């Protein structure tokens, strides 16, 4: 069965520091992976998605993620954290069982310290 | 273009009462999904509509939950009677083409349900 694991339910970084949010997947078939962000009182917003076209995927707001098959990982990074990046981040994999649906990780709440 | 909207944003009810959540998808999106997040846990799939038909309801917890999408536009999710463990945030999402693995689902802000 396909699954997603996000290591670290809470991550704190200083403003200007590197952001690294971890996501590992388990899949017997080529996975299609997504990162979503939820800002307070808003819905989930797509940051980026892996579609097998390129292993390094660039998303919105300066975020990017690299698909590493050998490590079964799809970690999310941003070179320099901004206060506005404080939010909850979700990794998801699209799975097929008659139709496509998402399986999510448990989420990582990012705190940015001034 | 309006995004996915959900109503109400919050609902607090007593155990045993009935609650109905509503979701309006993005116009033109045939696919509508319901997900739920219980506090501290992952967001879990509940069901998927294609137009007015239930394509997959494998995630529905039990028969106290009833989802409808009459006319293939908005959808409602009714919980009757509500139990304490039904508390959580209910998300709705919509997409254009569920036949594509990389199809993006667009999420609403969620309805926070608290059952006392």
Image (cartoon, helix red, strand yellow):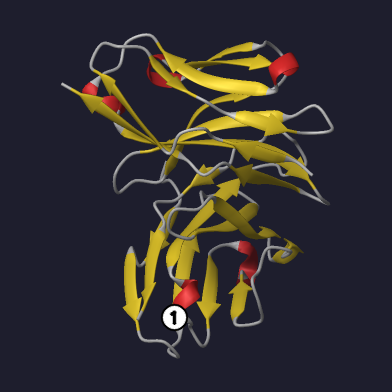
Q: Where is residue B113 in the image (x, y as percent from the top left)?
A: 39, 69
Quarter of the rendering containing residue A68: top right
Judge whether residue B33 can be spotted in this image. no
Q: In this view, does A112 lie to the left or right of A38?
A: left
Q: In this view, does A20 lie to the left or right of A50?
A: left
Q: Work out which residue is located at the far front of the displayed protein and give it.
A: A8
In the image, residue B18 sits, relative to residue B38, either above or below, namely: below
Judge whether residue A78 can be spotted in this image. yes
* Mark 1 neighbour density, 10 Å: few (under 14) some (14–19) many (20 or more): some
Give the camera-side residue of B46 and A26.
Answer: A26
List the residue tagged with mark 1: B19
Q: Where is residue B9 in the image (x, y as percent from the top left)?
A: 33, 63
In the image, residue B102 sits, relative to residue A71, either above or below, namely: below
In the image, residue A36 sits, relative to residue A113, either above or below, namely: below
Q: Work out which residue is located at the far left of the displayed protein and give it.
A: A114
Quarter of the rendering containing residue B21: bottom left
Give the camera-side residue of B23 and A55.
Answer: A55
Q: Position of residue A8 (x, y in %)?
A: 45, 34
Q: Quadrant of the N terminus of chain B?
A: top left
User: What chain letter is assigned to the residue under label 1?
Assistant: B
Q: Position of residue A80 (x, y in %)?
A: 32, 10
Give the camera-side residue of B31 and B16.
Answer: B16
Numbered disc 1: secondary structure: strand
């Amino acid at each position: 069965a396909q699954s997603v694991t996000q290591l670290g339910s809470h991550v704190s970084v200083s403003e200007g520091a590197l952001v690294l949010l971890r996501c590992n997947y388990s899949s017997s078939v080529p996975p299609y992976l997504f990162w979503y962000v939820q800002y307070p009182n808003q819905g989930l917003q797509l940051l980026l998605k892996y579609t097998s076209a390129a292993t390094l995927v660039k998303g919105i707001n300066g975020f990017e993620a690299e698909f590493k098959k050998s490590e079964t990982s799809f970690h999310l990074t941003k070179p320099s954290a901004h206060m506005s990046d404080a939010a909850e981040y979700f990794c998801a994999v699209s799975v097929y069982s008659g139709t496509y649906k998402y399986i999510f990780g448990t989420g990582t709440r990012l705190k940015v310290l001034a | 273009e309006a995004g996915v909207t959900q109503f109400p944003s919050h609902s607090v009810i007593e155990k045993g009462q009935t609650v109905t959540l509503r979701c309006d998808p993005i116009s033109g999106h045939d696919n509508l999904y319901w997900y739920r997040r219980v506090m501290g846990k992952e967001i879990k799939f509940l069901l998927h509509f294609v137009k007015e038909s239930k394509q997959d309801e494998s995630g529905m917890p039990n028969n106290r939950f009833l989802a409808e999408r009459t006319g293939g536009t908005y959808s409602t999710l009714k919980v009757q009677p509500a139990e304490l463990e039904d508390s959580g945030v209910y998300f709705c999402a919509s997409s254009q083409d569920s036949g594509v693995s990389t199809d993006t689902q667009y999420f609403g802000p969620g309805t926070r349900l608290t059952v006392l």
